[in-house]
Image (cartoon, rainbow, N blue to C red):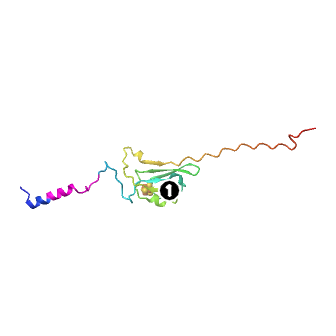
Amino acid sequence: MRAPRHHLGEMVSSVLGSLFRKPATIRYPYAPFKMPDRFRGPPKWESDKCIGCKLCSRDCPSQAITITKVGEKRFDQTVDLGKCVFCGQCAETCPRKVITMTPDFELAQIDKQNLKITYHASPAPAAPAPQPAAAPEPAKGAGEPTV
Ligand code: SF4
Ligand code: SF4
């Protein structure tokens, strides 16, 4: 059956129009893709600002966060992205604003252990070197000529 002539004309003009229009699809994964500004991906920690209060861990609805003391006022933070639901509650709760939600979305892993991400506190600054002991003061009269 032949297409009616007026439909054929519409089809041809639509095809020709598409040749000069921007494609509606994107080239991902061959070209990078940026998520919208308010997209919530995995949380990320600035470890050295953490005071170890554990409020983020307490408020996390998925129990995905572990805070570990690793030294004097130093804490590591571990998040299990296999449990995280990207709700952003931890970032809301943290009193030190240590946590930000990232726009990352390529999270697939073969081994689910790789979904546990730990942010490490930097090592504590070295203790100041001990000062050398002061030389003893000469006893009174010492060094004076004797008669
Ligand atoms: S984003 Fe939500 S689920 Fe994920 S670690 Fe933070 S509080 Fe837990
Ligand atoms: S709420 Fe903030 S300061 Fe407290 S343990 Fe979590 S990341 Fe650290």
Q: Is residue 54 visible?
A: no
Where residue 34 sits: x, y (%)?
A: 36, 54
Residue at 17% from the left image edge and 58% from the top image edge: 14
Taking depth in this image into account, of 30 and 79 the one nearest to the observer is 30
Q: Is residue 31 toward the left or the right of residue 44 in the image?
A: left
Residue at 59% from the left image edge and 47% from the top image edge: 125
Where residue 58 sits: x, y (%)?
A: 49, 57
Taking depth in this image into account, of 126 and 80 the one nearest to the observer is 126
Residue at 32% from the left image edge and 49% from the top image edge: 31
Asked which secondary structure carries label 1, the reply is: loop
Magenta span covers which residues? 11-26
Locate the C terminus by quadrant: top right
Q: Is residue 54 toward the left or the right of residue 85 in the image?
A: right
Where residue 136 sits: x, y (%)?
A: 79, 43
Q: Is mark 1 within 8 Å of ligand 2?
A: yes
Q: Residue at label 1?
A: 98
